[in-house]
Image (cartoon, helix red, strand yellow):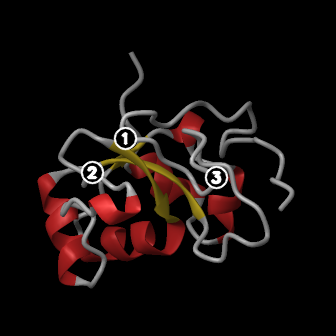
Amino acid sequence: MTPDASINVLGGALAHCSSDPLTGYFRDGACNTCAADTGSHTVCAIMTDEFLAFSKYVGNDLSTPRPEFGFVGLKAGDSWCLCAARFLQAHDEGCAPKVSLAATHARALDIVPLRVLQEHAEPQG
């Protein structure tokens, strides 16, 4: 699998998303992607209790630890490379988490409009 270029939605170098917990399609801490990543794990989202409850409700439980897969479970405040379609669904339902634009891969724009990502951008400071 050859990764796509590590470019973020702003056109710059893709920033790191999270090492604790370790995230990314390649489990490299970044929202890198490739043609095989059919889920487009490209949005660096900062988890909230509301989003985690929504995700569980729609069938993707991200909060329950699954040690057999090396997954510790997510909690509010954790950053995670989220599927772009799930982020858009959460936006449409009014419970999208904040995102790090610098750490969100440009391929997310194939699914989520930039203005939507900007609406949920984590304040830079």
Answer whether labels 1 and 2 touch (C-beta < 8 Å): yes
Residue depicted at 61% across the width and 68% down the height: 40
The answer for how far apart the CA atoms under marks 3 and 1 are is: 13 Å
Residue depicted at 56% across the width and 66% down the height: 112
Of the 4 image quadrants, the one containing the N terminus is bottom right
Q: Type of residue at label 3?
A: Phe
Out of 125 and 14, give the one closest to the viewer.
14
- Report x, y in % for residue 30: 59, 41
Q: Which residue is mark 3?
A: 26
How many C-alpha atoms fall within 10 Å of the one at disc 2: few (<14), some, or many (≥20)?
some
Out of 92 and 80, give the one closest to the viewer.
80
Q: Type of residue at label 1?
A: Pro
Quadrant of residue 110 within the rendered picture:
bottom right
Say which element carries label 2.
Answer: loop
Q: With 96 as the anchor, is 32 left or right in this view?
A: right
Q: Is residue 103 above or below residue 4?
A: above
The answer for how far apart the CA atoms under marks 1 and 2 are is: 7 Å
Q: Which residue is mark 2?
A: 72
Of the 4 image quadrants, the one containing the C terminus is top left
Q: Is residue 27 above or below residue 107?
A: above
- Report x, y in % for residue 77: 23, 39
Q: Which residue is mark 1?
A: 21
